[in-house]
Image (tube, rainbow, N blue to C red):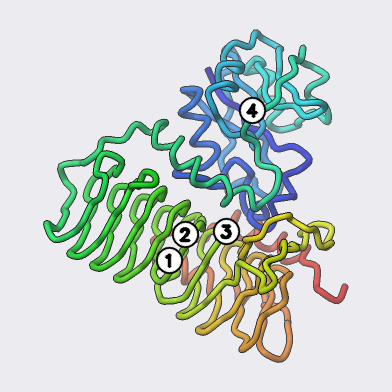
Amino acid sequence: MQLLLFEDKFCHAFHPLTLTRPVDDLRIGVLTIREKWQRALKATATTRNLREVLHGVFPAPSLDPERDCYLVNARLLPEPRIIDKITSLQPDEGLASGDLLLAGRISGKKGNSWKTEFPVNPGSQLKLRSFEPEKIITGIWNLFKMNGDEIRRDVKLLDPVLLEKSAVISPRSLLENIDDIYIGKDVVIETGAVVTATEGPVYIGDGAILMAGSITRGPTAICKGSTVKMGAKIYGNTTIGPVCKVGGEVSNVIFHSYSNKSHDGYAGNSLFGQWCNLGADTNTSNLKNNYGTIKFTDWHTREDQDTGEQFLGTVMGDHSKTGINSMLNTGTNCGVCCNLFSHGYPPKLIPSFSWVNSQNTSVYLFDKAMETMERTMARRDVKLTDEYIRMMKHIFDHRVELND
């Protein structure tokens, strides 16, 4: 079977992370949502309905028109009950929760049509069965709240070996509850590194490095090519995505990929996109002094909403950076390509392409931002493409300043 992932009307709830990616590219647990469904449904080919601004940045290949495909809402996470329901669907049948379409089965020909021109009401073209899902992300903070459980699920989906022979593990490291520690190819665990999986699995992807004296506590995922710096303290429910460098103290955080927090400082209950860089001694507040629930400013409506959460730190879009000794307030919502280097707390809502110092917030000039972006990506041998620049120009042109 083939797979078509689709976004619904709630995709804007995940901005600023989804300004630069489809919902199915959000990382939660070890894998992205797309990677989870590919494995859960054993999909032989995968495509998506893609917003115009993301064309050319993310692939949306054609399906085989002669074969059926599963249709899956990108906010939905796989778990045994819904996997069973989806795989038992007949052609042109679907699953819905109220008026929310969850999944369906359609022809590859129809899938090719829908990926370019998705119906306003796709459920009207399917015979629907009612189903209440266990796992669906409804708010952006769901990503870190559900992260520990998703690490446990993804380990089962991946079925990794406990220890690849090519791993280099110092005899003076400490691995506690080794039966729940998964170590990939060419992993290096240096002297004095501690990995404890007594409260959940620790997944260490191919080529990852755990430097001397670092402490990692499960459930945690350290993905392919990432580095945990010397003396780092990585608490549970944390995902360090591919090709990241993380140091200091981190608790219940997701780094998507190519992002760095190389130095001391604390990050908790937070989400960071790609290519973010936190300067030395950057700290995120994740708890109010009065222990009350945290308000978070909706990216689209710009209205404060009471999340009901006691712990919520920072959400930061791709390519944003902080200077040394930066402080980020509880419930900070930072857009794409921002530069924060103020002595005090920056605003809790920071529009994309903002240049924030201690005196004011100004616009980060597009050409200057692209120069920095190109240099940043070249350091990891990633090319800044014309399509990527076009996406960034769209974000720049549609940015909303705080005083508008």
User: Does the CB distance between marks 2 and 1 fall below 8 Å?
Assistant: yes
Against 143, is 263 above or below? below
Residue holding disc 1: 378
Against 105, is 194 above or below? below
In the figure, is residue 370 to the left or right of 396? left
**Where in the figure is residue 24, as x and y percent of width and height?**
59, 40
For mark 1, does the 10 Å Cα neighbourhood hold few (<14), some (14 to 19), or many (20 or more) residues? few
Q: Secondary structure at mark 2?
A: loop
Which mark is nearer the camera, 1 or 3? 3
What residue lies at 53% left-to-right and 46% top-to-bottom? 28
Residue holding disc 2: 383
Q: Nearer the viewer, residue 404 or 36?
A: 36
What residue lies at 73% left-to-right and 55% top-to-bottom? 308
Sequence-first tag of 2 and 1: 1
Quadrant in the picture for the C terminus: bottom right
Sequence-first tag of 1 and 3: 3
What number is the disc on residue 187?
none
**Label 2 to label 3: alpha-carbon separation:** 24 Å
User: Does the CB distance between marks 1 and 3 fall below 8 Å?
Assistant: no
User: Does the CB distance between marks 3 and 4 fall below 8 Å?
Assistant: no
